[in-house]
Image (spheres, rainbow, N blue to C red):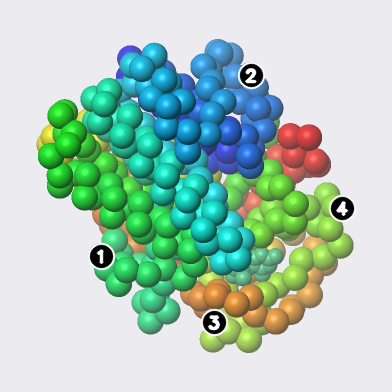
Amino acid sequence: MKKILVTGGAGYIGSHTVVDLVLNGFQVHICDNFNNSSPKAVHAVEKILGVNIPLTKLDLKDKSAVGNMFEHGDFDGVIHFAGLKAVGESTSKPLAYYENNLLSTLNLLDACKKYNVQNFVFSSSATVYSDPAVVAYDEETTKTGKASSPYGTSKLEQEWILEDCVNGAEFPAGLRVVSLRYFNPIGAHSSSMIGEDPRGIPNNLAPFITQVMVGRREFLSVFGGDYATEDGTCIRDYIHVTDLARGHRLALEYIEKQPENSMEYINLGSGKGSSVLEVLHAFEATYGKSIPYKIVSRRPGDLPEFYAKTEKAQRLLNFKTEYSLDDMARDSWNWQKSNPNGFE
Ligand code: WQD
């Protein structure tokens, strides 16, 4: 049975991926610093699965703690989710983002090198794409070297570091990397026991909508109604977090069959764009009532429209999304309804 270290395994995507991995025969070890997640998410995962998940609370910036965990870990692979991830915050705190995200990855790679861990799945993001002239992004779109925020740039830079390590000669067993670039994950596990639980005012659309539905916020501000799209609101590619979690497992299964040194960039999205109002209407359908909203001014940095080209994920991973936008809205809502205050 393969043993996988999942960094950030208590987070939104991490926790769902742990469920998928264990259900498919992987052994999992979680590490998390709980800066933006709750140990209760790990307890909920254990309840869903009926097994205990080994957990190390640590900060990946602490190199000796990372080394210690690897020394006793006997890991066959790593899925690296942990990191700071708020686009807006990264603009005001670029140094914190570069320091946290880059140092964490460097320390993990150093431990992989020392302890001969060859398989590495990296949690990247569609935010590495920033060219407004392109709509459906394929994996070759980004060679320009800059994303639209320090957060996005930190993801690009981590990809470069990984690629350089794959091409270098420091890893005695070689290094095989898949960098998964996700589009907009929403939804929650069908048990409603885990889901997205942002701290403070949500930056992202779905948790904001469900907090309005549950009465924690008065109305949704729709950022811009005058884009050159059919209904004037921005178009994004939403993907159910359960589909996304499965994509990580498929990436691990794929990576094991690759040559000693290899790197692939793979989009995980549905390939279909939905506008903000379409998303809102999907939530209204599951709610059975209308959801108050106001169209306000555009959010700086938002692109009018983007979605994934999905051929590569299909070809290499045999990955195709299974859940619809209605499924995503239903599951996000069920999670929030059962946990109005998240894990608190
Ligand atoms: C979606 C749409 C907003 C909130 C970000 C990151 C991306 C990825 C996912 C991590 C946009 C609109 C939102 C609100 C709104 N994360 N919106 N009112 O910006 O597409 O992507 O999260 O890697 O990298 O950039 O997602 O959920 O913030 O916004 O109208 O209160 O909803 O303008 O069109 P985004 P989002």
* Label disc, if present, on residue 140 of the rendered structure: 1
**For the residues bearing labels 2 and 4, Cβ distance under 8 angstroms:** no
User: According to the image, label 3 marks what residue?
Assistant: 229
> What element does badge 4 sit on?
loop
Percent position of residue 112, x then y: 29, 30
> Which tag, 1 or 4, sits closer to the chain's start?
1
Which amino acid type is marked by label 3?
A: Thr
Q: Classify mark 3: residues with Cα within 10 Å, few (<14), some (14-19) or many (20+).
A: few
Residue 141 can be seen, yes or no: no
> What element does badge 1 sit on?
loop
> Which tag, 4 or 3, sits closer to the chain's start?
4
Q: Quadrant of the C terminus?
A: top right
Closer to the camera: disc 3 or disc 1?
1
> Which tag, 2 or 1, sits closer to the chain's start?
2
> Which tag, 2 or 4, sits closer to the chain's start?
2
Percent position of residue 149, x then y: 49, 67
**Label 2 vs label 4: CA separation?**
28 Å
Which amino acid type is marked by label 4?
A: Gly
> What element does badge 3 sit on?
loop
Closest to the observer, 211 or 115: 115
**For the residues bearing labels 3 and 1, Cβ distance under 8 angstroms:** no
User: According to the image, label 4 marks what residue?
Assistant: 215
Q: Classify mark 4: residues with Cα within 10 Å, few (<14), some (14-19) or many (20+).
A: few
> Which tag, 2 or 3, sits closer to the chain's start?
2
